[in-house]
Amino acid sequence: MKIKVIDVGKLVVSLVACQLAGLIGSFFTITSITTWYATLQKPSFTPPNWLFAPAWITLYVLMGLAAFFVWRKGIDKPGVAGALALFLVQLVLNALWSIVFFGFQSPFGGLVVIVLLWFAILFTILRFFRLSITAGALMIPYILWVTFASVLTFSVWRLN
């Protein structure tokens, strides 16, 4: 398979966009981890804090690759623009969760956002699978992690 310069640009933009969403979320998360979040009651299955950053960085790479595989089909191809728009919606919801949960210190608000995020990811995966099996498959670890994060968010809300 021949790699085109335009494809390299799409790959870089896709990866950077996803990592930027994570970076935006981290601005709201980092200041709350040792302060507000540390005071919350958490369920026994809460992972250690150090696990979240590498998990999310990895997921953002997989998400960026998924978006790239769809984008590379051609924005003018049927379904591509809609799938990428849906991808952007879930990416915004992804960053919004950190803003609401950590920035606004609202577990309930975070729960509302993460449920919306979960559905947006599901719809994105379904659209991606129609365009690229690889892209759809790359999103599976993400929805699995967000499923776990949803249960965790619900549990934190209930305990506090």
Image (spheres, grey):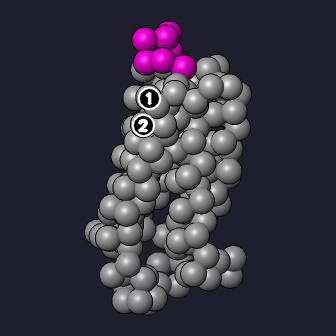
Tell me the crowding category of disc 2: few under 14, some 14 to 19, or many 20 or more residues within 10 angstroms, Cα based.
Answer: few
Residue under numbered circle 2: 9
Residue at left 64%, top 20%? 130
The residue lying toward the viewer, choosing from 115 and 1, is 1
- Classify mark 2: helix, strand or loop: helix
Q: In this view, does 155 lie to the left or right of 71?
A: right
Tell me the crowding category of disc 1: few under 14, some 14 to 19, or many 20 or more residues within 10 angstroms, Cα based.
Answer: few
Quarter holding residue 44: bottom right
Q: Is residue 116 inside the magenta stretch?
A: no
Q: Give the range drawn in magenta.
A: 73-79
The reply to whether discs 2 and 1 touch (Cβ–Cβ < 8 Å) is yes
Residue at left 43%, top 18%? 75
Is residue 144 visible in the rendered structure shown here? yes
Q: Would you say the magenta stretch is mainly helix, strand or loop?
A: loop
Residue under numbered circle 1: 6
From the viewer's perspective, is residue 129 above or below residue 14?
above
Residue type of the residue flagged with mark 1:
Ile
